[in-house]
Image (spheres, helix red, strand yellow):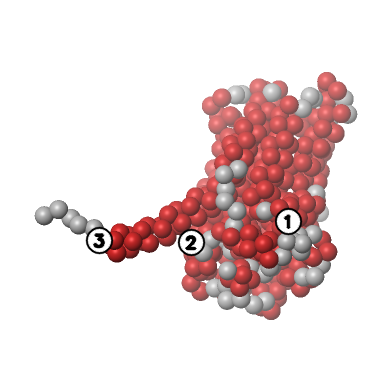
């Protein structure tokens, strides 16, 4: 007997299909927003990954250490310009839309990477070469400073309340993925494509060309992103009071909370990512190949943890995860770094760093959504981006230099205690702040 469809049944099916279609569009938008974040972080970390190869092209010197210090100084400047990027793109995101800020930030990153890829060397134009490198790096720093606040805001607003922690955790999945991608490109070029002499002569330009091309792809993908309903509603009701430094200053408590909750987490993040590569080689004594393998494996492990912790925060709240990170980080940072320092081989080093990531992921997985839930839509992108960029510039960007300074002074363990103290300061902030899952400004606006 053929099936029959009544008008009521057809309408019911239509209503059932509509939420599925909306959810599919939401997931697609979150995916595209996250992928753009991966591209930007890939471009930013290519500089660190390939600096050993291009340092002599821009800073001629008979002393390799002097070359490394010169490239490292420019790397640091890329961090210190990030608050300006947070303010600039935060204003664009709060005033003109999250999508526009996301598009402009990836476009600026494309320009910075392309400039590095095409820059003439010191032998060709003299001092103009490092100047061009500095300008390119500043463009990348501006871009990344704007990317964090814009993407954190977009992902948090686009996600539903029930799964906001899970979806926003993909910001750090892609952030780590960008670092991992830069590492993979380095490994492929080193082992399968070019020899060391070719990499030093011209091969170091390849990853920056790749990054510029990927940024264009991300730009095209982001151009089709829908704007968030939270932003559209806020702009319709309050168009003349959207974004800007003056409006940000009306939320001093929230800004201080962002700085306080970020300082310990960002320091821990950079300890177990960028600094850990040097730590494994200089202090643990692993070979270059072992260092790269352990770094890559721990980054994969860390990326897998993020959505698990994000989903957990949707069930038990954000504050318990932050507290677990800070309490365990305060107790175990010194023992863990000491144990890694005396690790017997790469497998033991991997296991210990994996233990560290079980702690640090309590912060990394949810820090973006916590910050977004603190601010109203009118100032959310700026409120997330600017104080975060300040904290990262001071505590994240300086982590490697402070660690190496302690090592140079013969007091390497002093850095372990410094990291512990900074995490303990964040613990005080977590104890005093409210759980943003229960008191979310995003939920209040929807």
Q: Position of residue 354 (x, y in %)?
A: 53, 57
Mark number, residue 6: 3
Hey, which residue is sitting farthest left in the picture? 1
Quadrant for the N terminus in the image: bottom left
Camera sees residue 180: no
Q: Which quadrant of the figure has residue 439?
A: bottom right
Res. 269 visible in picture: yes
Residue 388 location (% of width, % of height): 73, 60
Q: Is residue 349 left or right of residue 420?
A: left
Location of residue 398 by image quarter: bottom right
Disc 1/disc 3 C-alpha distance (Å): 48 Å
* Residue designated by label 1: 95
In front: 164, or 66? 164
Residue 195 falls in which quadrant of the image? Answer: top right
Q: Which mark is residue 308?
A: 2
What is the C-alpha distance between the residues marked 2 and 3? 43 Å
- The relative height of residue 135 versus residue 206 in the rendered view (above or below) is below
Report the residue at 14% width, 53% height from top. 2
Which-is-in-front pick, marks 1 and 2?
1
**Which SS class for mark 1?**
helix
**Is label 2 in a helix, a strand or a loop?**
helix
């Amino acid at each position: 007997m053929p099936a029959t469809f009544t008008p009521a049944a057809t309408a019911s099916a239509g209503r059932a299909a509509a939420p599925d279609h909306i959810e599919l569009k939401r997931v697609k938008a979150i995916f595209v927003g996250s992928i753009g974040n991966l591209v930007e972080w890939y471009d930013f970390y290519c500089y660190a990954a390939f600096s050993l190869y291009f340092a002599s092209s821009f800073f001629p010197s008979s002393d390799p250490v002097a070359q490394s210090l010169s490239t490292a100084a420019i790397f640091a400047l890329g961090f210190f310009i990030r608050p300006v990027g947070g303010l600039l793109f935060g204003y664009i995101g709060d005033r003109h839309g999250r999508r526009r800020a996301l598009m402009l930030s990836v476009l600026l990153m494309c320009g910075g990477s392309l400039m590095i890829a095409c820059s003439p060397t010191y032998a060709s134009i003299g001092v103009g070469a490092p100047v061009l490198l500095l300008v390119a790096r500043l463009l990348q720093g501006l871009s990344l400073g704007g990317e964090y606040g814009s993407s954190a805001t977009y992902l948090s607003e686009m996600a539903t309340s029930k799964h906001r922690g899970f979806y926003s955790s993909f910001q750090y999945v892609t952030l780590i993925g960008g670092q991992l991608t830069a590492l993979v490109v380095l490994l492929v070029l080193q082992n399968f494509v070019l020899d060391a002499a070719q990499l030093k002569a011209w091969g170091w330009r390849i990853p920056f060309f790749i990054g510029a091309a990927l940024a264009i792809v991300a730009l095209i993908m982001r151009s089709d992103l829908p704007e968030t309903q939270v932003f559209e509603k806020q702009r319709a009701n309050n168009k003349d009071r959207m974004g800007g430094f003056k409006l940000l200053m009306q939320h001093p408590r929230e800004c201080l909370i962002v700085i306080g909750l970020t300082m310990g987490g960002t320091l821990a993040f950079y300890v177990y990512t960028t600094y850990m590569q040097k730590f494994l080689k200089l202090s643990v004594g692993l070979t270059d190949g072992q260092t790269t393998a352990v770094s890559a494996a721990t980054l994969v492990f860390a990326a897998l943890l993020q959505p698990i912790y994000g989903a957990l925060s949707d069930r038990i709240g954000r504050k318990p995860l932050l507290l677990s990170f800070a309490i365990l980080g305060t107790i175990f940072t010194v023992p863990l770094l000491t144990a890694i320092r005396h690790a017997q081989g790469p497998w033991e080093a991997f296991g210990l760093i994996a233990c560290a990531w079980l702690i640090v992921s309590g912060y990394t997985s949810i820090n973006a959504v916590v910050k977004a839930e603190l601010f109203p839509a009118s100032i959310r992108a700026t409120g997330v981006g600017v104080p975060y960029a300040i904290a990262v510039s001071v505590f994240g960007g300086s982590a490697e230099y402070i660690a190496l300074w302690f090592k140079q002074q013969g007091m390497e363990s002093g850095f372990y205690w410094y990291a512990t103290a900074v995490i303990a300061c964040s613990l005080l902030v977590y104890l005093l702040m409210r759980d943003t899952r229960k008191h979310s400004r995003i939920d209040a606006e929807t």
